[in-house]
Each structure stands twice: as structure tokens, then as C-alpha cells.
Image (spheres, rainbow, N blue to C red):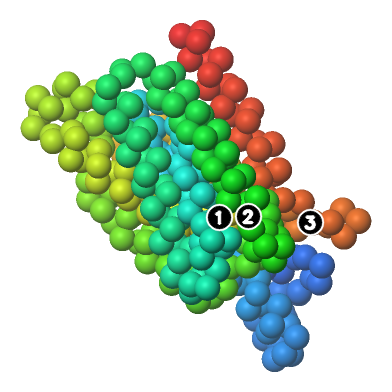
């Protein structure tokens, strides 16, 4: 990593992260002064802080989870626009959540949401992985992910058609993407899965570098590509499933963050890209959630609306740039 990039990653990005974290906690329908954040004993202020703190921390770790998931998927499938949302993994998780909320509402949501969400995400990941092994065409993998999203959407519609009103309302609110329902207790799932996955990916960063050179060359260097790809897809499925089970299917964070990280790092080394992508994802989701809470006539904008505004242009730029090359 170049000296300028190292300074930017170690100083500038953390400053932005702290700034967005402060805005997420201090600003909203009721603004809280910095002095009150640090010294106030008011119960109402403490209650607001507790709610906003859980929201801010979930934005940090969910954003980071989606970002490194996107990075790993782009490396695994050699596809620059791969991501949990684009490849249908989020749709698989959505089907799992629909089953948990609508078909099995009697189960504990603290357990069933991440469990069914992980099953759906892992199922889609395995199908996409099999297609990637059979076909070397990047567009084929992308189209399969898109088709899976349509099929899963149809299955979700079938589940919704037999749902009760309360369950349907809960699922509909979830699909809009929101961090408002994440509680401090839920953070234990999110942080633990992120921490384990991040550590494993950093430990295997050299193997990720090897995998990015292509399956044939990676095999000649002694990497068991199929086993390693299965490990990566399992981690990505868990990361995506736990993240979206609490926040809803938030799009474009996973696709855009790794590319922003590459522009900053100016390197393809995953040991640097993984933490920088995580920081970028945290910043983007913190900022997006803050903007979504700036009320327009007391209406809260869904997070997906904000993430699409910066995610779609980045994806279009990548597609057009790759065609020009």
C-alpha cells in the first residue's frame, strides 16, 4: 500500500467513521448536544442514546459485513459487480426470513431469523457456485443470480399469499430495510459472526490473492479451489444472513464498498482490502441511515433508497468501463 493510501486509510476514513457515528447518535427528530451525550443524567436522553447507540453499532457491523461479503464474492466469481444483493444471496435470506416470520411465527425470532436466513443464503450461494464451476462466463453467473432472485421472489409471494395480517406487516416493514428494530441484544449475533468471519478471511488473505489469479493458476500453487470456495461461500452466507435478518435486504453496500476500497488502496492485496472495505461499508451504511432519518414531512426514507443513489452509478460505471476495456 502506498504511503498516501496508508495515511488515508488509517486517518481520514476513521475520522469520517467517527463523524458519521456522532451524527447517527446526536441528530434526529430530537437533537442531543455533545455535552448531554457525555454528561447528561436525564432518563429521556439515556433512552434515546440507548436506541441510537444500538442503531449506530448495527450500522457499523452490518455495513462492514456486507462490504467484505461483496469483496469475497467479487474475488470468488471473478465478477466486478458480484455482491449479496446482485447474486441473489440476499433474496435467499429474504425467503428464509419470510418462512421464519410468516410460516413459523411461534418460534423464537432471536433464533429462527438468523437460522432460516442463513439456510436461504447458503442455498443460493451453493447454486451460484455450481454454476460458476460449470461456466467460466461471468455474465452467465450474473444472469443465474438474477433468475434465482426472480424465482425466490415468486416463492416469497406464495408464502405471503397465505400469511396473516400481522405477519405480513412485519415482513413488509422488514423488506424496506431499516436498522430501527435492531436491539443491543441482537448485536451479539452480528458482532460475533462478523468477528469470526473477519479473522478467518484475514488469515486466508494470501489464499484470496491466489484465488484472484484464476482457478487453474491457483491449483498449480497448491490451493484446493473447491474446498476454499466452499469455505468462502459459507462465511459470506452467514455474514449476509445475519446482517439482513435484522436489517432487511440492504442493497449496493456490498457491491460498491470493495471498489471504493480498491480506488483508495491502489492494490489488489486482500490483507489491505478486507479491513478497508469493512470501514468503507460501515461509513456508507452509517451515512445512509443518517440521511434516511432526516424526515421529510415526518416520513422516514427507506435505507435502500439512499444506498441505490450511490450504488447504481458505481455499478453502471464499472459495467461501462469494463466494456470499454
Residue depicted at x 55% and y 55%: 98
Tag nearer the camera, 1 or 2:
2
Residue 75 x/y as whole percent: 34, 32
Evaluate whether residue 145 shows in this view: yes
**In-front residue for pair 311/175:** 175
Quarter of the rendering occupied by the N terminus: top left
Above or below, comparing residue 16 to residue 206 in the picture: below
Name the N-terminal-most of marks 3 and 2.
Answer: 2
Write down the quadrant of residue 253 in the picture.
Answer: top right
Q: Earlier in the sequence, mark 3 or mark 1?
A: 1
Q: Residue at x 20, y 40 (%)?
A: 228
Mark pair 3, 1: CA separation: 23 Å
Name the residue rendered at 24%, 23% in the picture: 214
Question: In whole angstroms, how far apart are the C-alphas of marks 3 and 2?
Answer: 29 Å
Dot 2: element:
loop
Residue at the disc numbered 1: 98
Which badge, 1 or 2, is on the more N-terminal residue? 1
CB under 8 Å between discs 1 and 2:
no
Q: Which residue is mark 2?
A: 162
Q: Which residue is mark 3?
A: 300
Mark 3 falls on what kind of element?
A: loop
Amino acid at each position: 500500500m502506498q504511503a498516501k493510501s496508508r495515511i488515508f486509510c488509517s486517518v481520514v476514513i476513521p475520522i469520517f467513521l467517527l463523524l458519521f457515528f456522532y451524527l447517527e447518535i446526536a441528530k434526529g427528530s430530537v437533537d442531543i448536544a455533545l455535552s448531554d451525550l457525555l454528561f447528561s443524567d436525564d432518563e429521556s436522553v439515556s433512552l434515546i442514546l440507548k436506541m441510537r447507540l444500538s442503531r449506530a453499532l448495527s450500522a457499523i457491523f452490518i455495513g462492514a459485513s456486507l462490504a467484505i461479503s461483496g469483496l469475497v464474492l467479487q474475488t470468488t466469481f471473478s465478477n466486478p459487480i458480484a455482491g449479496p444483493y446482485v447474486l441473489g444471496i440476499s433474496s435467499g435470506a429474504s425467503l428464509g426470513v419470510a418462512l421464519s416470520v410468516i410460516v413459523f411465527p411461534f418460534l423464537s425470532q432471536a433464533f429462527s431469523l438468523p437460522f432460516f436466513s442463513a439456510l436461504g443464503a447458503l442455498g443460493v450461494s451453493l447454486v451460484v457456485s455450481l454454476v460458476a464451476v460449470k461456466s467460466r462466463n461471468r455474465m452467465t453467473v450474473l444472469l443465474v443470480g438474477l433468475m434465482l432472485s426472480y424465482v425466490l421472489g415468486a416463492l416469497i409471494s406464495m408464502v405471503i399469499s397465505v400469511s396473516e395480517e400481522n405477519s405480513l406487516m412485519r415482513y413488509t416493514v422488514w423488506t424496506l430495510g431499516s436498522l430501527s428494530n435492531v436491539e443491543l441484544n441482537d448485536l451479539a449475533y452480528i458482532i460475533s459472526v462478523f468477528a469470526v468471519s473477519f479473522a478467518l478471511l484475514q488469515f486466508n488473505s494470501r489464499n484470496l490473492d491466489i484465488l484472484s489469479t484464476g482457478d487453474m493458476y491457483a491449483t498449480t500453487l497448491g490451493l484446493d479451489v473447491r474446498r476454499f470456495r466452499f469455505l468462502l461461500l459459507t462465511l459470506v452466507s452467514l455474514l449476509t444472513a445475519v446482517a439482513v435478518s435484522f436489517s432487511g435486504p440492504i442493497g449496493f453496500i456490498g457491491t460498491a464498498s470493495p471498489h471504493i476500497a480498491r480506488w483508495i488502496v491502489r492494490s489488489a492485496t486482500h490483507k489491505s482490502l478486507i479491513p478497508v472495505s469493512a470501514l468503507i461499508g460501515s461509513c456508507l451504511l452509517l451515512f445512509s441511515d443518517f440521511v434516511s432519518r432526516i424526515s421529510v414531512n415526518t416520513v422516514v426514507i427507506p435505507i435502500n433508497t439512499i444506498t441505490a443513489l450511490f450504488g447504481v452509478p458505481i455499478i453502471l460505471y464499472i459495467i461501462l468501463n469494463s466494456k470499454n476495456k
